[in-house]
Image: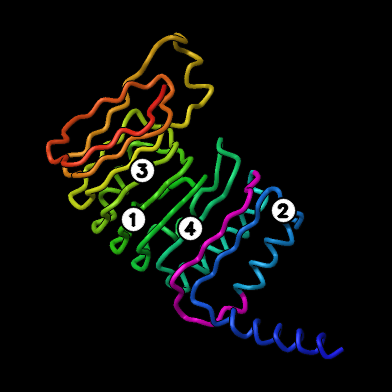
């Protein structure tokens, strides 16, 4: 009975501690025995009790299925904005065809320093304003030339830009004065890309980066021929395990 009482006291102390935590991280793997709905609820409950007015880091990783949990994730992004989070890691595994669209309130944020998005699409209606952002990493995102341009023009302090298995653009046109490091980690192949083309036809994927000094290219580029343009400032280049 004493052990039970001690455990109860520790649990209460722990609850008091995590409600004051400045770093919040939540992970749910597909192999977990824990129900994902229960996991989502635990995040909701935790955020309600969070006391700090400002957080250093907010991280979530779970298997995102269609739009089943979109309202919950939207509320978390509101929380991120209110709490002036500096580092955001949103890893929504699965569902690469559609993905999660970052809500409009997220596109004007002066607090974000580091942002990592997986299976998340950027759909700004009025541009992007992330002046404090230094590092942006995007995984499995559907891009457009307009979105890439909005990133370059709206992140005036951005130093490192990383695209891993993204798709939807004929090339990466990095028209930014601040970005010095560019990473292209493969290109996600959509089955409908070849529907109207010859199966044996290769297409160019242009990388245009006039102020980039460090370039790293790796991964699989399905039927893509990489073409570098306007990279006169390039001082360091790495080509790691590239395949077609």
Please give the residue where the numbered disc 2 appears in the rendered image: 32
Residue range (magenta): 48-65
What whole-number distance in Å separates the C-alpha atoms at marks 3 and 2? 35 Å
Q: Say which label, 3 or 4, has the lower sequence index.
A: 4
| Residue located 62% across and 48% down the image | 64
Please give the residue where the numbered disc 3 appears in the rendered image: 147
Q: Say which label, 3 or 1, has the lower sequence index.
A: 1
- Crowding near the residue tagged with mark 2, few <14, some 14–19, many ≥20 C-alpha atoms within 10 Å: few
Residue 163: x, y in percent? 38, 42
What whole-number distance in Å separates the C-alpha atoms at marks 3 and 1? 16 Å
Residue 167: x, y in percent? 43, 33
- Crowding near the residue tagged with mark 3, few <14, some 14–19, many ≥20 C-alpha atoms within 10 Å: some
Residue 13: x, y in percent? 66, 87
What whole-number distance in Å separates the C-alpha atoms at marks 3 and 4? 19 Å
Q: Secondary structure at mark 1?
A: strand
Residue reaching furthest front?
3
Q: Secondary structure at mark 4?
A: strand
What whole-number distance in Å separates the C-alpha atoms at marks 1 and 2? 31 Å
Q: Say which label, 4 or 2, has the lower sequence index.
A: 2
Mark 3 or 4: the one toward you: 4
Residue 135 is marked as 1
Q: Is residue 55 magenta?
A: yes
Residue 89 is marked as 4
Residue 150: x, y in percent? 31, 47
User: Considering depth in this image, is 12 or 38 the residue closer to the camera?
Assistant: 12
Q: Say which label, 4 or 1, has the lower sequence index.
A: 4
Q: Secondary structure at mark 2?
A: loop
Instruction: Indicate whether 115 appears above or below 50.
Output: above
Left or right side of 30 for 140: left
Q: Are marks 4 and 1 in contact (CB under 8 Å)?
A: no
Left or right side of 73 for 137: left
Mark 3 or 1: the one toward you: 1
């Amino acid at each position: 009975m004493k052990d039970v009482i001690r455990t109860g006291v520790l649990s209460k102390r722990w609850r008091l501690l995590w409600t004051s935590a400045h770093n919040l991280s939540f992970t749910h793997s597909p192999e977990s025995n824990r129900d994902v709905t229960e996991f989502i609820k635990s995040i909701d409950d935790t955020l309600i009790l969070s006391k700090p007015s400002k957080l250093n880091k907010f991280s979530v990783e779970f298997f995102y299925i269609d739009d089943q949990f979109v309202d919950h994730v939207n509320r978390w992004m509101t929380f991120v904005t209110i709490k002036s989070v500096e580092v955001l890691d949103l890893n929504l595994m699965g569902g690469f065809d559609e993905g999660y669209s970052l809500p409009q309130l997220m596109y004007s944020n002066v607090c974000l320093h580091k942002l990592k998005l997986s299976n998340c699409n950027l759909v700004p209606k009025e541009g992007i304003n992330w002046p404090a952002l230094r590092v942006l990493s995007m995984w499995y995102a559907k891009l457009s030339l307009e979105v890439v341009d909005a990133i370059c023009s709206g992140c005036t302090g951005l130093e490192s830009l990383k695209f891993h298995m993204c798709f939807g653009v004929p090339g990466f046109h990095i028209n930014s004065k601040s970005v010095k490091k560019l990473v292209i980690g493969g290109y996600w192949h959509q089955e409908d890309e070849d529907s109207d083309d010859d199966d044996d036809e290769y297409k160019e994927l242009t990388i245009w980066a006039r102020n980039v000094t460090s370039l790293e290219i790796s991964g699989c580029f399905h039927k893509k021929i990489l073409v570098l343009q306007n990279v006169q400032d390039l001082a360091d280049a790495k080509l790691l395990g590239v395949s077609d």
